[in-house]
Amino acid sequence: MKSLFGTSGIRGKVIEVFTNQFCFDMGRTFAKFLDNHDQPGLVAMGIDSRESSPRISKYVIEGLKSSGRQVSYHGAVPVPACHNTILSTPAVGSVMVTGSHIDLESNGVKFFAFKEEISKENEQEITNIYYQLKDQVACPTNDPEQLPLDPAGLKNYIDLLISLSKNTSKKSYKIVADPGNGVQTEVLRTVLPKLGHELIMINGDLKKELLSRDTEADGSFKDLQDAVIKNKADLGMGFDTDGDRVIFIDHLGNFIPGDYSGTLIAKNHPSDTIVTPVNVSNVIESIGKKIIRTKVGSPFVVAAMKDNQAGFGFESNGGGVYKDVMLSRDAGNSVISILNILSSSKKTLSELVSELPKYYIRKQKFDCPTEKNSLILEKAKDFTSTKSVDTTDGLKLIIDDHNWVLFRPSSNAPEFRVFVEADSQQKADKLLSDALEYAKNLIK
């Protein structure tokens, strides 16, 4: 039985996957899952601002209600705000309808329970329940009415972020924020001015179409980079549309990858142990802390943080996880953390990044039949001479202390990904080109 879940949550084309019946059955499934774990009580619902999200949420809610669950509807909120409902309201579980950064014809759902993002084991259990319950009860044929909006989800999250601010120097920054017309818009519009900062917002209109962007790709936030320079701002911050990932732009307009912002936060975090996936830059190794490497995906980061008593973990996409706040990605917390670091150090973001070793990261994917994945992973061992090999997730060939290549199949699509890192731009470009050519030739 194939799992419904990908790296994080269930995702797919709206027309093909998120039918009214599927959404209704997922509501019933999550209710049964909570029943099985003796979790009676309220379930919270949040959505991103995609056109399909309200409909999907209505039918998930109907499924929950048909199973005897009361539901609180929090409307368009960031993913961490939806998670926070089970930490700050009576809700015992929450569901977030979100497609994150994928195309606008697709969408997804994520689940939170036991005070955290559900585990990979929970995902399999939910998959099993779904296949047992699917299509046994017909979903409503009429368009259900949406529940009244509960403002606690957004309000409590805003209050949480303000409480985490430690602006010791009382310095005010000029900040350009780009939420991509997504659900961090109102949070930023409220939090940053309340903390005394000057906010310039671009792409901050929930009524306009979402800008679904890859937070890992340099060039995805060109408008933000230009706006920082034009407005002579101190920094910029760009978000994915559901608000659990953030990247930063320094005052010179330079794109700061999540590997580097995550490393800055890790360096200044009190935890001696930091968790990152295998595709995160070697820059994290420079801070002198214990580094635990995991499979790619926030559920794996969360699990490793719990197993290793780590206080912080992060991904290269700009997603940071803070154990003392919530065990899932939270872009808002990363914004506050970076502002706290700037305030305490009295340095610019550019200066802080320049103190870290410089690495060049490249990544690309290509179409690949799923049945060919094992062939690439087996044959790619001979791609180059190595210092060591890491098979935590895919095949990572560690060439030396500064250069590596990772061959990794997609977990839920007929695609294959190649990641490389090198200590010069020329090396990185050549390593990626050679690795891609090698992998593609294996499946001809």
Image (spheres, rainbow, N blue to C red):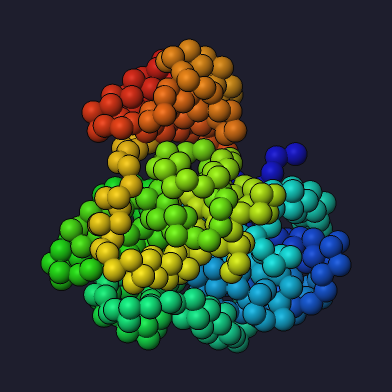
Quadrant in the picture for the C terminus: top left
Q: Which residue is found at the position 53% from the left and 79% from the top?
A: 160
Q: Which residue is found at the position 38% from the left and 78% from the top?
A: 168
Whether residue 316 is situated above or below residue 198 in the rendered picture: above
Q: Position of residue 246 (x, y in %)?
A: 40, 60
Q: Which residue is found at the position 59% from the left and 69% from the top?
A: 325
How many marks the image carries: the answer is 0
Q: Position of residue 99 (x, y in %)?
A: 50, 58
Query: Depth check: 435 or 14 in front?
Result: 435
Residue 58 at least partly seen: no
Q: Which residue is found at the position 31% from the left and 37% from the top?
A: 360
Horizontal arrangement in the rendering, residue 426 relative to residue 302 (left or right)? left
Q: Position of residue 331 (x, y in %)?
A: 46, 64
Q: Position of residue 270 (x, y in %)?
A: 53, 61
Quadrant in the picture for the N terminus: top right
Where residue 188 sits, quadrant-wise, is bottom left
Horizontal arrangement in the rendering, residue 444 relative to residue 119 (left or right)? left
Horizontal arrangement in the rendering, residue 338 relative to residue 67 (left or right)? left
Whether residue 198 is situated above or below residue 31 in the rendered picture: below
Query: Depth check: 87 or 50 in front?
Result: 87
Residue 155 at least partly seen: yes
Horizontal arrangement in the rendering, residue 19 relative to residue 277 (left or right)? right
Whether residue 397 is situated above or below residue 44 in the rendered picture: above
